[in-house]
Amino acid sequence: QVQLVESGGGLVQPGGSLRLSCAASGIIFSINAMGWYRQATGKQRELVATITSDGSANYVDSVKGRFTISRDNAKNTVYLQMNSLKPEETAVYYCNADVRTITWRRELYWGQGTQVTVSS
């Protein structure tokens, strides 16, 4: 079917930066919006940023000016550049993609998540 694989997570000090990547593969005809979400321990999953197929981006207020979402449509990949990270942003980060498959089904797919830990 369709798989999303995230990478780039890890341990970073407060104020540091990380770049997450999420590559989609499989029976993809086209991808509409893609997004990044995060879920801290004991909390609900929350939206971080989304980007449309033509590059229009939206962010949760708490990350505006520090995070940048981008995508490479030729590679079916979405990125999240995270700067000035804060300890409270420690979470598992998930990507998703609104995919039209070659069988003409439209579904929302999720990656398995990548851990981001912000700590000194």
Image (cartoon, helix red, strand yellow):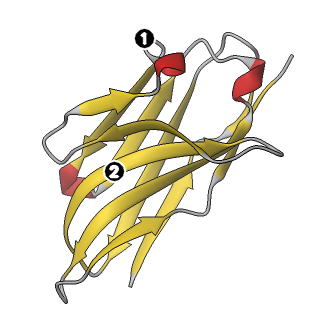
Q: In this view, does 87 lie above or below 110?
A: above
Mark 1 residue element: loop
Q: Are marks 2 and 1 in contact (CB under 8 Å)?
A: no
- The image quarter in which residue 117 lies: top right
Residue 12 relative to residue 105: left or right: right
Q: Where is residue 97 in the image (x, y as percent from the top left)?
A: 36, 59
Q: Where is residue 79 in the image (x, y as percent from the top left)?
A: 40, 40
Q: Where is residue 84 in the image (x, y as percent from the top left)?
A: 60, 11
Q: What is the residue that sits farthest to the left in this orientation?
A: 54
Other residues around mark 1 within 10 Å, as few (<14) / some (14–19) / many (≥20): few
Which quadrant holds the C terminus?
top right
Residue sitting at x 72%, y 39% = 91
Q: Which mark is residue 34?
A: 2
- The image quarter in which residue 113 lies: bottom right
**Residue 45 in sight from this viewpoint:** yes
Other residues around mark 2 within 10 Å, as few (<14) / some (14–19) / many (≥20): many
Give the spatial CA distance, label 2 vs label 1.
19 Å
Q: Is residue 111 above or below residue 62?
A: below
Q: In this view, does 95 lie above or below 98?
A: above
Residue 102 relative to residue 112: left or right: left
Q: Residue 97 carries which label?
A: none
How many numbered marks appear?
A: 2
Instruction: Tell me the amino acid under the disc marked 1.
Output: Gly
Q: Is residue 28 above or below residue 85?
A: below
Mark 2 residue element: strand
Instruction: Tell me the amino acid under the disc marked 2.
Output: Met
Residue sitting at x 49%, y 64% = 110
Which residue does the numbered mark 1 point to in the structure image?
Answer: 65
**Residue 116 in sight from this viewpoint:** no
Residue sitting at x 33%, y 74% = 107
Which quadrant holds the N terminus?
bottom left
